[in-house]
Image (cartoon, grey):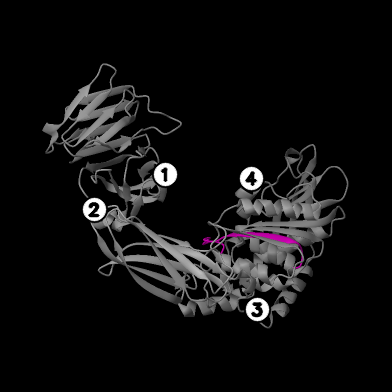
Amino acid sequence: MTLLTIAGTVTANPALGAEKVVLKQSGDRSVVVTTPVYKATIDADGHLTELSVKGAKTFTMPFGGIMEPIRAEFVNVTNNMVAVRRGEKRVEWTFNEDTIGVVTEGYDFHGRLDESLKAVVGPGGKGGPFPKFAGVSIAIVLANDLTVTYEEHMHVHQDRILPSRYLNGSGKSGDLIEFAFKLGEPVEATQLLSRVGLKPFGTKTGFPHFHDAEKIAFKSTQTNLSKKAFDLTQKLTVRDHYVAGKEVLAIEQPVAMQPGEAVTTDWNVKPLEPGFYYAEIEVLKDKKMLTSEKITFTVAFDHYRPAPTRPRDFDEFWDGQLAGLRGLPFDDTLTEAPAKSTEAAIWYDLELTIAGDKRYKTFLLVPRKKGQYIGDFAGKPDKATRADRVQIGMPLETVEMMTFRRWNSREDNNMLDSYLLAVRLTDYLRRRDDVKGIFLFGASRTGPVQFVNAALDPTKIIGVDIHVPTSAGIGWADRPYYAWGVPNGYKPDQPEQVNSFTKMAVYFDPVNFAPEMKVPWIVAYGLDDDLAHPQGIEAMYQYSPAKFKRISRDVGGHQYSKGFQELQKELAAYLGLNKAAQTDEKILKEH
């Protein structure tokens, strides 16, 4: 089928099977379409309210979005086309015997899948039973093994289906969408194998951690959704790192899958050293991989102590950096900004020297009522809820150095600049008579900055709250770091690049500052976070000698977890503060 777009109209070329299509429009403007393969109904507002293929329901297809239903002005039927319009927005359907073409412009395009569907099939045969599957789809399998196949990739989540271009950045809601889907064509039998699942066995919580390194086990599950038996091979591989990882284990097992059967396979793993591991199970037929699944798991946290990378002249280097910084006069100027002030706090524009002849411009928010306050760092001023504190600004948008991408040398890089800036602003708060203590907060890329700030000099610092901090383990050559903070063009699978980079990075790795971290602090990580590596954060926690320290180990990625929110309350109570130092809104905005 070919659709031609001409001056805002769409003309359908005659297509094979169109003569077997019957369109009937009622007085209420709704349209019923019938062919030997399917039945479709379009209501008076242009929404596809039913699509059944040989008696099996598939999905409905509303347009216009949740907040803006289409409310069509015109629903016109011409031959085998239904055209729906409202102003410049349009939806046009072209119906043939087993293929339906869609053009929409100005409205979004999404469908609601019917619970009677059997499975969802993704590219390369990956897929799974509906509605558990979430991911990219090329086909939907009906209860009678017929399918709906798409010309372009669709994204399935729960009972919703929409073009993948909406999610991958190549398109957006309201763009011109023009493609077709075919109904009734069966898929290859092997595509009816569900996606394989892999879960740790014997762990006490949802977090995949094995306390006993001698008792590591997994279970894999897979379902044969077809009417054909399969003889398959399943392979479990364990690596010691998510990037450039070394293989520490590989096991294969034959698996016979009968029609309609769900198969569970047990995997017993040899004892592993304490640490983080990455398990992948692959399902193969005739040595060809059909589907796979990866998970992260951990072993024996209590004994997790990665080899130190702290260089011999570490203390000498940082003593010299701090001496040079503190030998500079602040030469600060405070300018009151009445328009930015509130009834409770005065806003000052602050400018001070941070290094050499470099000047830094930021803000200082000071309570009008005289007293003793906690000094607090802020990316954005929190005038409504933090008027009981002296706030000093460290806004990300004004700090080019926090890209952490410039690595010219040990003495010339963004990370050094960021660490020294944090110390400089903390020193400024330390010298104020109205600041009785300082609370440091860092989220994501500001997390390592404030952790190192407290480790370099704990004077007057009462507590540190760092949420999913990046850069932990950035100096490890045997487990290369690859996320925020590495040089542009860095390749972690090339040892010469890794070794060259880590010779500088060891001086800035938060893990190497952890032995000096003695003030109360809390931290969190997501097990599958590829921005803030969990293995490095765990090492920071294990090496710190602080009397009060707490960690939230969470399933998921770069997130503000419920576990961490509870730690914030616990730290606030420990420090005798009225409430946690940061609001939820602030945490989400500032990293």
Residue indicated by mark 3: 310
Q: How crowded is mark 2: few (under 14 residues within 10 Å), some or many (20 or more)?
A: few
Helix, strand or loop for disc 3:
loop
Q: In which quarter of the image is residue 521?
A: bottom right
Tell me which label, 2 or 1, sits earlier in the chain.
1
Residue indicated by mark 2: 227
Q: In this view, does 51 lie above or below 329?
A: above
Please identify the residue farthest to the bottom as the structure is shown. 312
Kind of residue sitting beneath label 4: Glu
Kind of residue sitting beneath label 3: Arg
> Where residue 281 sits: x, y (%)?
39, 66
> Where residue 105 sits: x, y (%)?
33, 35
Q: Are the two marked residues, 4 and 3, in contact with CB atoms closer than 8 angstroms?
A: no
Dot in front, 1 or 3: 1
Q: Are the two marked residues, 2 and 1, in contact with CB atoms closer than 8 angstroms?
A: no
Dot in front, 2 or 3: 2
Q: How far apart are marks 4 and 1 (CA)?
A: 28 Å
